[in-house]
Structures are given as structure tokens and as C-alpha cells.
Amino acid sequence: MRYISTRGEAPALGFEDVLLTGLATDGGLYVPESLPHFSLEEIRSWRGLPYAELAYRVMYPFVEDAIPADDFRKMLDETYSVFSHQAVAPLVQLDTNEWVMELFRGPTLAFKDFALQLLGRLLDYVLEKRKQHVVIMGATSGDTGSAAIEGCRRCEHVDIFILHPYQRVSEVQRRQMTTVQGDNIHNIAVKGNFDDCQRMVKESFGNQSFLGGKTQLAAVNSINWARIMAQIVYYFQASLALGGPDRSMAFSVPTGNFGDIFAGYLAKKMGLPISQLVIATNRNDILHRFMSGNKYEQHQLEHTLSPSMDIMVSSNFERLLFDLHGRDGAAVKDLLERAAKGPVSIEDYRWKHARKLFDSDAVDDKATCDTIRDIYEQNEYLLDPHTAIGVRAARNCRRDSAVPMITLGTAHPAKFPDAISESGLVVKPQLPAHMADLFEREERYTVLDNSVSEVQGFIAKHWKNA
Ligand SMILES: *Cc1c(COP(=O)(O)O)cnc(C)c1O
């Protein structure tokens, strides 16, 4: 399998290089040159498989040039055995033909574990083979950082430095990052905001001379192809559990950077019958505005009760735009260069095609809280605010009540206790038993000034072989 850039100018790469590369050299994102396609008969034959085995069937075509089948199977067994539920991605029923798929049974209680637990193992495997080392540098306002740290804690060939804005992430989220012990794990609290952290990461990727040529940076943000790939699997899992592929499914996906829902779109293209995909956003609704009115335009960032979806642009949307433009990289490049300067639209027939593929809704904090409260009162089931947005959008956009509607449950409610109390419920979400002592664990992080040279100096000094 070869991977090509959405902007059409960077060289095509194999899986190993795509794994180790962030952005393509032309500024685009890598996508598979062609997708595997599974027949209904083949998908049907996967009924009842354990999650890790299903993951193997769905993903192997993407990695087969780089990893022997047995090694990949072993890696997947290890990856999904760290989840705290035997089904890995269990379904919970909310109402007649309405479900939540709980994707928060991994080590950091958010769906990002599905991809990052695998990504850490993939990186270490490829780096071992190549006798190479990388430094992962990332900025986080919460979920990504902890999932990345957990995913890389046992990697021998990776040092990880995660920047978070000092005193501006929730205590649960900070502790999930800072209590993970390991010589290769470095948390940096920057005296600035999330944008400052992100800018430093971007600048460092642009000029890596501070590493003295002895190692290189790698990215684990949601533009990494391997993350998208890992997220395709659970769409198959949910469908098979509810009678697919002999009936089609609808999915509602709480969306920020368009990674998780793009994986659903790929599952459909790979042969899974999906009749509806709902993009569920919070007030940071650039995608909903595009879907409703064919205008792609950045607005100011708003802080909401669902912080993991607080974005101004959706980086993975570029991957969809590439398909919408008949995979014409030059057209995507032109569009996104214009989009960086002001609002853009696409040709009407292309936009109409996007409208056929996706429905969308934007849910504000009040409606989020109302949904958390309603579902608790009806079912004694607690939703986290991100999942609540998905459930709300699912109900608002539903087209056919005979089709099972599955909302992706992206985080455990105990990660976001503020939203639960704002919804007026007196119940306190409990951390699962394996994390109950989170508030007693020892924390380790370094506070640094809002200065890129200080951060780079720290990294240069602290990676393993420095
Ligand atoms: C990251 C995240 C999202 C958004 O996922 P994207 O792939 O960026 O669309 C939604 N909910 C939670 C809890 C997250 O951590």
C-alpha cells in the first residue's frame, strides 16, 4: 500500500515512512492511494471475532508491506488487552434502536487510546527494525497528551515531551499525564496558553537543529495516518454486533479535528453498510457551518464544556476535501491556501455530494447539559459532555428509526465532572477502580517560561542519549 499527499506534490511513501512522518513536505496529509474493499460475505464471516482479531482483518491491508502478519497480530493482542472491558468497545442501549459505543475503557478513559496504544507499539516496532530513535513532541489541552504518554510509556526507542498550558488543564487531565512514571516521559507546563504550546511545537518541527542531528521529531497528533486507521475498526465492530452487514447503521460522532468521523467515512468506503454519518460539534462549529451553508470560515475559539472539541479548524477535513475534489491535490492546495486567509466555498455539486455523505449539528453547552440530565433521568446512565453532544445530534438528525443509531462514546464521564454538576445532577461520576488512586499518585512535571528556546533547550538536554 502506497500513501499519497492531499496536496499532490510530496513523494508517495510506504507505511513505515508515513508512520514516522507528520505533515507531508508539501503541507498536505497522507492518505492511502487506494482503499481495501471487503465484500458483504467477507464482513459477515467476521461475526463473533474478538476485537483484536477483527482489528487484524480490517487493518492488515494497510500495513502488510511493513509488518509480517504474526507480528501484527501479536501487537494487536497486546494493544487491546490493556482495555478494561472484555469486549473492548462495548455497546450500551439508550432507547429503542439507539446505542452508545463506549470507547473509553482504555488506560486514559478516552477513545484516543484505541489509536495511541497501537501507535506506540507500531513506532517502537519500526524503530527497532531501523535502529532509529525519535523524540515525540506534542501540545495538548487534555486528552491527546495523556493518551500519547500512555501509548509510549514502554517504548524503548521513543522519548516523549508533552507541552500543556500551565494551570489551564483540568486536574484529572493533568494528573493522567504527570503521574505516569518512566525515564522517557517528560511533561512540560508552559507559562502560556494552548496556542503558545502549539506554536512552539510547530516551530520545532520546522527547524529541528536544536536536536543536533542526533535524533528527529515525530508527531502523534490526529493527522498521523495510523491513528485514523485504528479508528476504522470499531465501526465494523459495532455493526457486526447489531446485525451488520445485513442491515445498515447510522453513527453520530462527537467531532473536533474530523479524525474519528473520517474513519467512519472510510469504513463505509471499505464496504461496511452505513446509511448515515452525523457530524456532532459544539459551538466551535466550523464543520456544521460548512455542511449547512457551504462556507468554510474560521471563527474565534470558544471555550466550552467539551474542551476536547474546542478547535478553530479541523485538520483532517483536508482528507475529505481531497476526495470531494476527485483527489486533485492542486485544487486542495489552492483551496486551503485561500482558506487560511478568509472564508471559502467549494463548487456546488461537490458540496451537495458532501451533504449526501454527512449530516451535522452544533450543540451548545446548555443543550449538552440538558442531554446529560435527560439521559441520566431516563436511564441512570451518565454521559460525558462530548458523548452527550453526539447523542443530542443523533436525535436531532436521525432520518430512519429502523436503522440502529450508534453514538460514539468518546470519554468517561469522570474525566469531566464540571459538566455533570452544571447539568444540575447531584450524582458524582466515579473514576473506575484501576484509577481510583489518581489523586494520591506522585506527579512529575517541569514548569518552563513561554519561550521556545527554553523548551527546546530542555528537550535537547533530556532525551535519552543527549
Ligand atoms: C479528541 C476528542 C474528540 C474529537 O475527536 P476528533 O477525532 O478530533 O474529531 C471528541 N471527544 C473526545 C473526548 C476527545 O478526546
Image: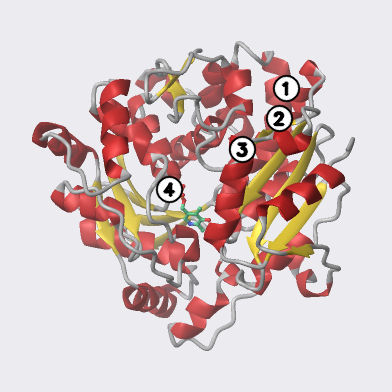
Name the residue tied to disc 3. 205
Q: CA distance from mark 1 to mark 3?
A: 21 Å
Nearer to the camera, 216 or 51: 216
Q: Nearer the viewer, mark 4 or mark 3?
A: 3
The residue pinned by badge 1 equals: 126
At label 3, which amino acid type do we have? Answer: Phe
- Whole-Å distance between the Cαs marked 1 and 2? 5 Å
Contact check, label 1 and label 2, Cβ < 8 Å: yes
Which of 139 and 262 lies nearest the eye of the viewer? 139
Q: Label 2 near label 4: C-beta < 8 Å?
A: no
Quarter assignment of residue 35: top left
Q: Is residue 270 visible?
A: yes
In the image, what residue type sits under mark 4?
Answer: Asn
Q: Position of residue 384 (x, y in %)?
A: 49, 68
Vertical comparison of 386 with 137: above or below: below
Q: Which residue is mark 2?
A: 123
Res 146 seen here: no
Q: Is mark 4 within 8 Å of ligand 1?
A: yes
In three-dimensional space, the C-alpha distance between marks 4 and 2, rounded to whole angstroms, equals: 22 Å
Q: CA distance from mark 1 to mark 4?
A: 27 Å
SS at badge 3: helix
Helix, strand or loop status at disc 1: helix
**Residue type (three-letter) at the residue carrying disc 2:** Leu
* Position of residue 256 measured from the top left corner of the image (x, y, whole percent): 42, 53
Q: CA–CA distance between discs 4 and 3? A: 20 Å
Quarter of the image for residue 134 reads top right
Residue 257 disc label: 4
